[in-house]
Amino acid sequence: MKDTITYTQIKSCIGSTKAVRETMKGLGLLRMHMTVTRKNTPEVRGMLNKVQHLVQTLEEK
């Protein structure tokens, strides 16, 4: 498994449930096309799995 993971918001949260909006905020994604790099942990992976229809992921070393 890689040390970090980079992900980008590719779709809007408009019309999503409150839980999905809070998950996006927890991931640090506040705007469209915003890219964030975080440590690759099970917690981050779980949040990304929950909002996989709104983000695009790219693993790094």
Image: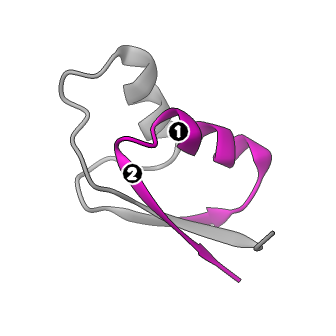
Q: Is residue 57 magenta?
A: yes
**CA distance separating discs 1 and 2:** 13 Å
Give the left or right position of residue 5, taking residue 32 as reference.
Answer: right
Query: What label sits on residue 26 in the rendered view?
Result: 1
User: Can you give x and y, in whole percent of width and height, for residue 28 in the image?
Assistant: 47, 49
Look at the picture and state if 22 lies above or below 56.
Answer: above
Type of the residue with mark 2: Val
> Residue at image x 77%, y 73%?
3
Residue annotated with mark 2: 55
Q: Quadrant of the C terminus?
A: bottom right
Q: Quadrant of residue 15?
A: top left
Q: Which residues are magenta?
A: 37-61
Type of the residue with mark 1: Gly
Q: Is residue 31 magenta?
A: no
Q: Quadrant of residue 39?
A: bottom right
How many marks do you count on the picture?
2
User: Can you give x and y, in whole percent of width and height, for residue 60 in the image?
Assistant: 63, 79
